Amino acid sequence: MVLIGAATLGGCTEGVLDPKGPIALAERQILLNALGIMLAIVIPVILATLGFAFWFRASNERARYRPNFTYSGRLEMLVWSIPAMTVLLVGGVAWVGAHDLDPGKPISSTVKPVNVQVVSLDWKWLFIYPEQGIASVNKLVVPVGTPISFELTSSSVMNSFFVPQLGSQIYTMSGMATRLHLQADHLGTYAGFSAMFSGEGFPDMRFTVDAVTDDGFAQWVRQTRETGLVLDKEAYAGLVKPSKAVAPFTYRAVAPDLFSSIVNAGMGRQDSSLSICSTSQRAER
């Protein structure tokens, strides 16, 4: 049993059961609480099944056969009350957790958060640091112990941003900006990826999250400002073209309000689509 358990849990590293931040830690606790509540009914049912099978075996002459038995109020109370209590408890855990871990709810901290704007492209991730004036592709660097305030959108199709060891996945949508707050409490490199199928290059739509010290983050920002290209509208027009398995690289500067223009461009496409649909419907009528 020990070997089987070790082999089974060996695949739990770098996932939701190996949290490295407060959000992921709280989410794991919800999973464990829900599991414990459900086992409170699953284990007794399994034991009762084995007990009934043993007691009513053919060789047990003390077991009474009652073919005309139809109803028992006590059994009905037992059969319905335990599942109902389980549903209430699991629902309560999920409801409280959903409010406490609302993606848009800032993390309580005395440390000023780092703002990061995220754009899901085909098929890569763009990370813009508006306060530092830099950007990176398929690589996210954050200071450990500091809340990260994400603002996310998509350049085209809907996507899903997910770093399992840090917590909450959230969708990115064209013409919309969603909010997410995460934090890394331990130094290290964590895997991030798209959790929603988005086309041919989806399998390679991955990125790394490097949680470094404050000095390491400041040094990375300085180095990034010294090398690389400028992410202006022309550079973004080239970046937005579909590409697969893109190696991480950085931009030393970013055009002002680039993220807002990406969101507004998506809103314009949505308005055009709605106008086309409306015109088509009127024509059909």
Image (cartoon, helix red, strand yellow):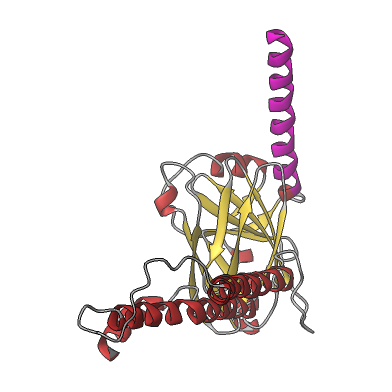
The part of the chain drawn in magenta is 260-285
At 62% from the left and 81% from the top, the residue drawn is: 144
At 62% from the left and 53% from the top, the residue drawn is: 171
Question: Would you say residue 77 is visible in this rendering?
Answer: yes
Q: Is residue 200 left or right of residue 109?
A: left
Q: Is residue 116 above or below residue 72?
A: above
Quadrant of res 116? bottom right
Q: Is residue 223 above or below residue 48?
A: above
At 77% from the left and 82% from the top, the residue drawn is: 109
Quadrant of res 103? bottom right
Q: Point out the image quarter for the N terminus.
A: bottom left
Q: Is residue 193 left or right of residue 274?
A: left
Q: Is residue 156 above or below residue 23?
A: above
Question: Would you say residue 223 is visible in this rendering?
Answer: no
Q: Is residue 38 left or right of residue 277?
A: left
- Dominant SS of magenta comes to helix
Q: Position of residue 272 (x, y in %)?
A: 72, 26
Task: Work out whether residue 56 or residue 281 is closer to the camera in this orientation and state it.
Answer: 56
Furthest toward the left, the residue is 59
